[in-house]
Image: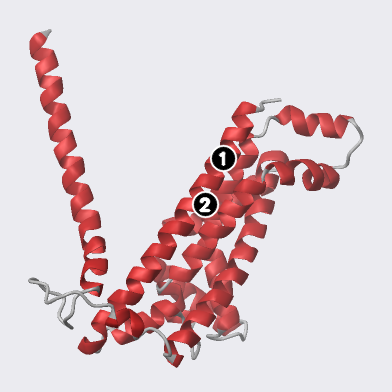
Amino acid sequence: MSSVRTDANAGGRWLGLYVLGYLVFLYLPVLLIPLFSFNDSIQAAFPLQGFTTEWYRTLYGNPALSGALANSLVIGVIAACGATLCGITVSYMDLYGRSPLAATISAIARLPILIPGVIVGISLLILVNLIGLGPSRISIVLGHILVALPTTVVVMRSRFAAIPKTIREAALDLGASDWTTFRRVMLPLSLPAVLSAFMLSFLISFDEFIVVFFLAGTESTLPLYIWSQLRFPRSLPTVMALGTVILTVSFIIAASAEILRHRGLGAARRNPA
């Protein structure tokens, strides 16, 4: 027994070292961006030259950056609204529609997460050209809805599944129609998940690059602006400062969305009936 316990402890230590090495490999490059954004040098290299906030001050009063940011915000909000609305509909019908068609649509809605982004971008470019839209803001919004839809479906489906079926059955037994039950019972109970799905889909849209690269045309978004600035070495510190701001805001939004989602699931477990 002692040898088995020793082998288990050794295996646990190796597993811990592997996880630690994986986390360092994955997140250390991300943590270097904020570090170099305060470095008083245009070179992202050690040793650091000194502390400065100059690169953050250069973010203000930049018309190209302001335009790209405004485009990303508008596109992100519209795409998040569309993806959340579609996610609510698809996931609800999948669980309560009792239709093979609803289950098929739900599976198709989650499929884009498995398809490489380049393939999605090329396919969407061909589609918008065929229907006459071409690369435009509308095309970007449609592409972002497609990319964000799997996330909203997963979030909303898990929330609807966590609501006891007896609640919906009781509303139907009391004479409420399906639409009334959904609007006045199921949707209010799912509000934390709706907000979480909206925030996550907005974050996906705001950070999306590959789809925008194919569909942008003359519309520049923040990821495209960052990519264009990487060609100029002197712009690298400003890009890292901008990346730090985006990283911080993205972390806050993602954490808030996860907190909302867990609160909703926790409320469903505490009130099973």
| Residue 108 seen in this snapshot | no
Q: Is residue 63 above or below residue 178?
A: below
Numbered-mark total? 2
Q: Residue at x 43, y 64 (%)?
A: 249
Q: Which amino acid lies under the numbered mark 1 shown in the image of this protein? A: Arg
Quarter of the picture containing the N terminus is top left
Quarter of the image where one finds residue 145: bottom right
Q: Is residue 258 above or below residue 246?
A: above
Quarter of the image where one finds residue 77: bottom right
- Nearer to me, 106 or 162: 162
Percent across and percent down for residue 38 are 24, 73
Task: Tell me the residue that label 1 is attached to.
Answer: 263
Q: Residue at x 48, y 70 (%)?
A: 206
Q: Is residue 108 above or below residue 49?
A: above
Q: Which amino acid lies under the numbered mark 2 shown in the image of this protein? A: Ala
Percent across and percent down for residue 61 are 43, 90
- Compute the Cα span from label 2 to label 1: 10 Å
Percent across and percent down for residue 127 are 55, 77
Q: Residue at x 7, y 71 (%)?
A: 47
Marks 2/1 in contact by CB < 8 Å: the verdict is no
Left or right: residue 8 compared with residue 103: left
Quarter of the picture containing the C terminus is top right
Which badge, 2 or 1, is on the more N-terminal residue?
Answer: 2
> Mark 2 falls on what kind of element?
helix
Quarter of the image where one finds residue 36: bottom left
Q: Is residue 87 above or below residue 79?
A: above
Task: Tell me the residue that label 2 is attached to.
Answer: 257
